[in-house]
Image: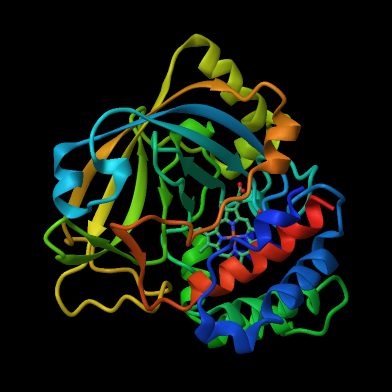
Amino acid sequence: MRLSALPTAALALTLAAIPFAASHAQNAGYGTQTVDEMNKLWGRHPGLRANHAKGVVVEGTFVPTPEAAKLSKARIFAGGSVPVTVRFSDSTGLPTIPDGAPSANPHGMAMEFKPPGGDPVDVVTNSLPFFPVATGEEFLALLQAVEASGPGAPKPTQADQFAAAHPQMPKAFSALKTPSSFARETYNGVDAFIFVNAKGERQPFRFRFVPEAGNDYLSTGDAAKQPPDFLIDELPRRLSQGAVKFRMMAQLANPGDQTRDPSQPWPADRRLVDLGEITLTKAAADNAKAQQVLRLLPNRLEPGIEVSDDPLITSRVQAYVISFGRRVQ
Ligand code: HEM
């Protein structure tokens, strides 16, 4: 197992508007505890995210397929072009992590779709094929185990013991590779969500964003030789020469497939539906400012897309809200 690949993994007014599930109120300290733990691991960097601190914001549009509107009544799938803001990022809260470092994996692709006349929809994905653990509490325990496993820690370290007790963790991380460009990676929603269509039919699914240019990865040796900002710098350069395109896909659950455990992928034969095309055309002008004010939440949805019974979604939101509150202070 590559422990080096672990993810050592004004806004105050907007906080009031964040959708919360009342049933998780008893765990209100989770977000603070988790962000504190991330700050311990990676330092606290004013104005920056507690995780995925290093990134780049780009702009473009999304055009849905007719198939998408059959699955979901969400306005983003109704037809026509929807403006989208996308932030690509490196893992960890380290603002100067080299893009080619193993722990910069999984890379993130976080999106805000802004349908004309409708509410925004956020989709926050990364390049993990599935999550290393099933719940937010286990993820916090993983961060704590990594923190206790620094240089000089007795062997087997707490991280080694955690990995042995959570076999999906080494599997998930060992699937990660450094892409040659943010535009040449596939990004997964990991958590299950539910489509609801105009007839009220419900279909669990997981998002997947596939680069039209195809996946392309570097060997570990080549990744280590790249300049520290090679991914962040390459994307605006690539966009100045032409659009970058992704297919938005959904992997549909079969009846009976579980939706509450993001560490258990569905079998590969589950139907993949093409929901539409994202066309990215330019980097945001004041990128640092654009990154700071962007607040993306995996449960900011609109009718037609709902959260599933996956508890990780609420845990994520609790942590993102705390991180956002701190970085806009
Ligand atoms: C319990 C599990 C998780 C926790 C506690 C967590 C925590 C966080 C935190 C605190 C941030 C910074 C948010 C901000 O300041 O805006 C963040 C960002 C991010 N997370 Fe997670 N995360 C979790 C799971 C996931 C999963 C499953 C994915 C992908 C499927 C993911 C993808 C991302 C991405 C892409 C960003 C950057 C968002 C942006 O660019 O604005 N995280 N995460």
Percent across and percent down for residue 308 are 35, 72
Instruction: Please determine whether, in this image, residue 275 is positioned above or below residue 236.
Output: below
Which color scheme is applied?
Answer: rainbow
Q: In the image as oriented, which residue stretches furthest toward the top? A: 241
282 and 164: which one is in front? 282
Give the quarter of the image for residue 139. bottom right
Res 37 quadrant in image: bottom right
Residue 297 lies, with reference to residue 264, above or below; the image says: above
Spot occupied by residue 325 in the image (x, y as percentages of width and height): 76, 59
Q: Residue at x 56, y 29 (%)?
A: 58
Across and down, in percent, residue 201 comes to 14, 65
Residue 229 appears in the rendering? yes
Quadrant of image for the N terminus: bottom right
Task: Please report the residue visible at 51 percent of the width from the left and 86 percent of the height from the top.
Answer: 23
Q: Is residue 79 left or right of residue 56?
A: left
Q: Give the answer, above or below, for where 211 lies relative to 167.
A: above
Of the pair 264 and 124, the residue shown nearer to us: 124
Residue drawn at x 30%, y 44% as measured from the top left: 75
Residue 323 relative to residue 68: left or right: right
Quadrant of ligand 1: it is bottom right
Rendered position, 141 above or below 64: below
Residue that appears at 58% across and 39% down = 87
Q: How many marks?
A: 0
For the residue pair 38 and 225, the one nearer the viewer reads as 38
Left or right of 40, for residue 257:
left
Q: Is residue 228 visible?
A: no
Q: Position of residue 102 (x, y in %)?
A: 64, 51
